[in-house]
Image (cartoon, coloured by chain):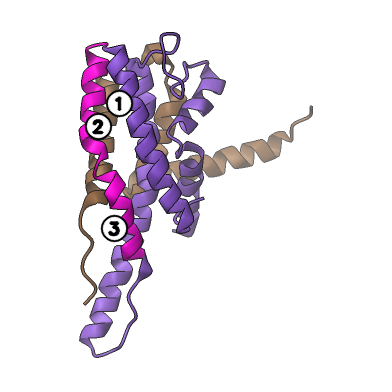
Chain colours: A purple, B brown
């Protein structure tokens, strides 16, 4: 399990700036950059595809952490029901802290998909920047709390 | 530069085994591996609407899962 987690965390570390995987792919495949979307680097469906997959890697890592946290909480709650005194898991507070940012992502993603579909490059670039800023914020929270480096 | 082909082969076999196991496990790990594979295996002109729809659905599911409330500690 730890080996699996390490692989995903490694992937997430590569991809967490959201442009990370795109940059990796850029180097390998000569893809257009998403970090500096502009007229020369438009937000195309292919770029959106990289963004969606890059974010999926990051969320896979976060969900691995969340699942481990939920399992610990459930185990602790079972011990408490047996009368044991168990200190609270710090991971729950960290997940709640991360959710402040991650709950703001879905509506932005919806807008981004719509703008890319309509080839509205100006608004697509603006929303992509907002999504990246959110990702950067929760990445900082995650790194600060040792969820991922 | 000289490569140790046996070593490269061993790493390739281990990676293949890991990815196969992860893909079959249905876990969060398998999603991460699938997403990474998607990025590395598609060139821009190979991305279809179906690929995009699948990537969107995968991400939406991942975000929805993470955003679920954790149980209270009691």
Mark 1 and 2 residues: CB-CB less than 8 Å, in contact? yes
Q: Are marks 1 and 3 on the same chain?
A: yes
Mark sitting earlier along the chain (2/3): 3
Side of A132 where B64 appears, left or right: left
Residue at the image position 25 percent from the left and 41 percent from the top = A104
The foreground one among B22 and A61 is A61
Q: CA distance from mark 1 to mark 2?
A: 7 Å
Q: Is residue B10 magenta?
A: no
Q: Are marks 1 and 2 on the same chain?
A: yes
**The residue positioned farthest toward the top in the image shown:** A40
| Chain of the residue under label 3 | A
Mark carried by residue A108:
2
Does dot 2 land on a helix, a strand or a loop? helix
**The residue positioned farthest toward the bottom in the image shown:** A83
Magenta part, dominant SS: helix
Whether residue B45 appears in this view of the structure is: yes
Residue at the image position 70 percent from the left and 33 percent from the top = B5
Does dot 3 land on a helix, a strand or a loop? helix
Residue at the image position 28 percent from the left and 36 percent from the top = B59
Q: Residue A120: where, in percent of width, then height? A: 26, 12
Mark carried by residue A96:
3
The foreground one among B43 and A106 is A106
Task: State the quadrant of the N terminus of chain A.
Answer: bottom left
- Per the image, the residue denoted by label 1 is A127
Does dot 1 land on a helix, a strand or a loop? helix
**The residue positioned farthest toward the right in the image shown:** B1
What range is drawn magenta here?
A91-119
Disc 1 packing (10 Å; few <14; some 14–19; many ≥20): some
């Amino acid at each position: 399990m730890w080996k699996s987690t390490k692989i995903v965390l490694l992937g997430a570390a590569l991809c967490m700036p959201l442009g990370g995987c795109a940059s990796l792919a850029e180097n390998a495949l000569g893809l257009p950059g998403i970090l500096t979307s502009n007229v020369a680097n438009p937000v195309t469906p292919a770029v959106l595809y990289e963004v969606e997959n890059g974010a999926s890697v990051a969320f896979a890592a976060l969900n691995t952490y969340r699942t481990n946290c939920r399992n610990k909480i459930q185990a602790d709650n079972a011990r408490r029901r047996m009368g044991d005194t168990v200190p609270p898991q710090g991971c729950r507070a960290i997940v709640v802290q991360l959710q402040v940012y991650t709950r703001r992502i879905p509506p932005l993603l919806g807008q981004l998909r719509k703008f890319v579909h309509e080839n509205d490059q100006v608004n697509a670039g603006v929303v992509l920047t907002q999504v990246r800023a959110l990702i950067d914020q929760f990445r900082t929270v995650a790194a600060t709390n040792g969820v991922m480096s | 530069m000289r490569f140790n082909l046996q070593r490269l082969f061993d790493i390739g076999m281990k990676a293949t085994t890991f990815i196969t196991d992860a893909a079959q496990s249905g876990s969060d790990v398998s999603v991460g591996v699938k997403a990474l594979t998607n990025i590395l295996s598609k060139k821009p002109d190979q991305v279809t609407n179906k690929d995009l729809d699948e990537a969107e659905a995968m991400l939406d599911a991942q975000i929805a899962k993470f955003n679920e409330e954790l149980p209270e500690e009691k």
